Image: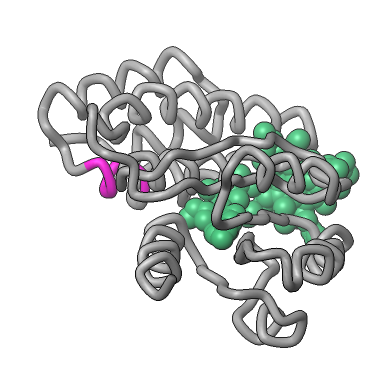
Amino acid sequence: MTDFEALKAAVIKGKRNDVTAIVQEAINNKENINDILDKGMIPAMREIGDRFSRNEAYVPELLIAARAMQSGLALIEPLLAASGRKSMGKIAIGTVKGDLHDIGKNLVAIMLKGAGYDVIDLGVNCDVEKYEQGMRDGAQIIACSSLLTTTMPYMKEVVEHFRGKGVKVIIGGAPVTQSYADEIGADGYSEDANGAVRLVDSLLKAC
Ligand code: B1M
């Protein structure tokens, strides 16, 4: 039985070795992957963010927590990666211009890969030209992530740029909402990584 509180504490404190040890043990014990994420690692990032808001944590603490989270994700990714399955479609994903947050974007990419999609990871700080490269490389869907209220408006530029070009643009990230997606005319929004997979499934089925 995994000690999710210990995992959460290890991520918050940025204890990379502890995070990898707990996640590896959870994997060995065939713990549900979604539980590892939803009961341990994701609440940890929420908690460190709340502490940051209250001035009880600062950027260096956010960074070391993020690194610890990424080391746990690195162990989970291969388990979710589709093994030799026929690709169900191609998605290009990136965090929008001006924004360097990539944990949520990485999680969405991992889940999409796990569901059998080819994923082009465009990284962070993506301008329309970078997303355009994703389209040239065959992506049917462009997925944009944003974590800052100041970078979220760039999603509107991306949506407008791709209008009529035959690719769909979907959006997500902590400050993003369905009503914002409707307002800017995005083809879809999802609140979390699993929702992103369902969204992509339904958009590509409709093609
Ligand atoms: Co930053 N940061 N940060 N940060 N950071 C937030 C976002 C913040 C809310 C913290 C706070 O104040 N409480 C705040 C934003 C406030 C606002 O905009 N109103 C903030 C700030 C202010 C900043 C800086 C400006 C701080 C500074 O320098 N003064 C700065 C900006 C840098 C920049 O980007 N230009 C900054 C920097 C950083 C670090 C570099 C230190 C680090 C990022 C490291 C990294 O990503 N490699 C960091 C971190 C770690 C956070 C918090 C604590 C955690 C983010 C995270 O990883 N969450 C965050 C607080 C918080 O979110 N509570 C915060 C876990 C992740 C799994 O969730 O990314 O939401 P999330 O992804 C979810 C969903 O949103 C969704 O699925 C994911 C999984 O379920 N999703 C999608 C995400 N993308 C999607 C795309 C889709 C669909 C779903 O496509 C269809």
Asked if 43 appears above or below 162 in the picture, the reply is above
Asked if 13 appears above or below 15 in the picture, the reply is below
Q: Please state if 53 lies on the left or on the right of 199 as rendered.
A: right
Q: Please state if 150 lies on the left or on the right of 175 as rendered.
A: right
The quarter of the rendered structure image containing the N terminus is top left
The quarter of the rendered structure image containing the C terminus is bottom left
Which residue is outermost to the top? 17
What residue is rendered at 35% in x and 22% in y? 75
Q: Please state if 35 lies on the left or on the right of 58 as rendered.
A: left
Asked if 137 appears above or below 99 in the picture, the reply is above
154 or 10: nearer the viewer: 154
What residue is rendered at 83% in x and 64% in y? 161
Q: Quadrant of residue 130?
A: top right
Q: Position of residue 164 (x, y in %)?
A: 73, 72
56 or 129: nearer the viewer: 129
| Boundaries of the magenta span | 33-37
Q: Is residue 52 visible?
A: no
Q: Position of residue 30 (x, y in %)?
A: 11, 32
What residue is rendered at 32% in x and 16% in y? 21
Let me know if residue 110 is in the magenta part: no
